[in-house]
Image (tube, rainbow, N blue to C red):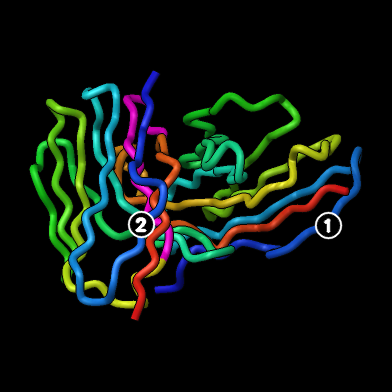
Amino acid sequence: KQEVTQIPAALSVPEGENLVLNCSFTDSAIYNLQWFRQDPGKGLTSLLLIQSSQREQTSGRLNASLDKSSGRSTLYIAASQPGDSATYLCAVFDSWGKLQFGAGTQVVVTP
Amino acid sequence: KAGVTQTPRYLIKTRGQQVTLSCSPISGHRSVSWYQQTPGQGLQFLFEYFSETQRNKGNFPGRFSGRQFSNSRSEMNVSTLELGDSALYLCASSLGDTGTDTQYFGPGTRLTVL
């Protein structure tokens, strides 16, 4: 059974610092991996999707890497801003097309 | 393009009642998935519909059911509500062709069971 873990559960950084968010999964036979952000009481906003054949994906200040062999993905956010404060979730697609989510990392960027 | 919409946004029900939630996907998307989010269990997959057929199902009791219409809109029904059904219910839509393409989530329906 696939398990997705995100460590740390919470993170606080000063504005301008780069953010590094980790995601690990137990079964390397994943299809795709998707990163989301969630603001309090809101739905999920898609950030990036990395296909299983890719090693990384970039969008603006965001860069996500994927290492299937070690069961890890990392989301980098460059030059963090207070507006980046949110909970970041990673999710992997299993062979049935279901998304398995991690518990998330709550990020606070202080001005 | 309009995003995924969910109605209603908030619901308060009492134990034993039933409830129906609605989800309208992004235009052109044929897959709709439903998730339950609670503080204790996080995000859990309920089921997925593609072209009016249930394609995937999570580990929830039969009280949770859904359907999809020909215009891809989907409804989720929960019968005989229990206190533990209080949660944020999220739906996600995608093109659905591969089953593993980008998922776009709606704002959710907050269900409170008293």
Circle 1 sits on which residue? B12
Q: Position of residue A76 (x, y in %)?
A: 18, 58
Out of B86 and A19, give the one closest to the viewer: A19
* Residues marked 2 and 1, same chain: no
Circle 2 sits on which residue? A11
Q: Looking at the image, which residue sits at the far top?
A: A1
- SS for dot 1: strand
Q: Quadrant of the N terminus of chain B?
A: bottom left
Name which residue lies at 38% across and 27% down: A3
Name which residue lies at 24% across and 39% down: A32
Q: Say which amino acid is labelled 1.
A: Ile
Residue B38 in magenta stretch:
no
Name the main secondary structure of what is drawn in magenta. Answer: strand
Q: Chain of mark 1?
A: B
Residue B86 is left or right of residue A17, and the answer is right
Out of A8 and B96, give the one closest to the viewer: A8
Q: Position of residue A61 (x, y in %)?
A: 17, 69
Residue A85 is left or right of residue B25, and the answer is left
**On the image, which quarter does residue B23 sit in?**
bottom right
Local crowd size for mark 2, using a 10 Å CA cut-off: few (<14), some (14–19), many (≥20): some
Q: Chain of mark 2?
A: A
**On the image, which quarter does residue B66 sit in?**
top right
- SS for dot 2: strand
**Residue A80 against residue A105 in the figure, above or below:** below
Real-space CA distance between mark 2 and mark 1, rounded to the nearest whole angstrom: 34 Å
Report the span colored magenta.
A86-98
Name which residue lies at 21% across and 24% down: A28
Q: Position of residue B83 (x, y in %)?
A: 82, 40
Tags 2 and 1 in contact by the CB under 8 Å rule? no
Residue A89 in magenta stretch:
yes
